Amino acid sequence: MKDIISNPNNASWLIDEIKQDEVNEFINKEDTALLVVYSEKCPACKNFMPLINSIYNNKHVPIKKIDAFKNVEFAKQIELEQIPTIAIFKKGNLIGQGTSHNPIAINALIDHVRSLP
């Protein structure tokens, strides 16, 4: 894992991709779920990958990714402004979204959302 974090050019996503028609099943099945909204051609998304992989390995929260340009209706539904974005759901409801590359902030958000009833 250390090599992935230190060299994102050699990294690959550890999380599975879903399509628009699979989103509801995923977010409703899990108490807390993260969706990473990205694009295959987005350089910033590739730089975001090691952080997401680290969260996946350490936070034990369900995470999937969805391509904004292949799933435009979903991007409109969450009023996506930029990519990459993390959308966090609690019991199927969108609680928040953001573009932070700060692992401390993302982990704090996950912990907060997990603590919600």
Image (cartoon, rainbow, N blue to C red):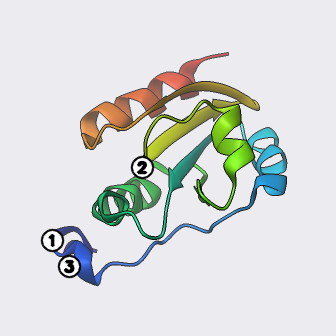
Q: Position of residue 87 (x, y in %)?
A: 55, 37
Which residue does the image show at 24% across and 40% down from the upper left? Answer: 102
Q: Position of residue 99 (x, y in %)?
A: 37, 38
Residue pointed to by mark 3 = 3
Does residue 32 appear anywhere in the picture? no
In the displayed orientation, state which residue is furthest to the left: 6
Taking depth in this image into account, of 92 and 40 the one nearest to the observer is: 40
Mark drawn on residue 6: 1
> Which element carries disc 1, helix, strand or loop?
helix
Q: Is residue 30 above or below residue 46?
A: above
Q: Gap in Å between the C-alphas at discs 1 and 2?
A: 19 Å
Q: Is residue 90 left or right of residue 52?
A: right
Q: Is residue 14 left or right of residue 63?
A: left
Give the mark nearer the N terminus: 1 vs 2: 1
Three-letter amino acid code at disc 1? Answer: Ser
Which residue does the image show at 15% across and 71% down from the upper left? Answer: 6
> Which element carries disc 2, helix, strand or loop?
loop
Mark drawn on residue 84: 2
Three-letter amino acid code at disc 3? Answer: Asp
Give the mark nearer the N terminus: 2 vs 3: 3
Q: Are marks 2 and 3 in contact (CB under 8 Å)?
A: no
Q: Is residue 37 above or below residue 2?
A: above
Indicate the quadrant where residue 95 lies.
Answer: top right
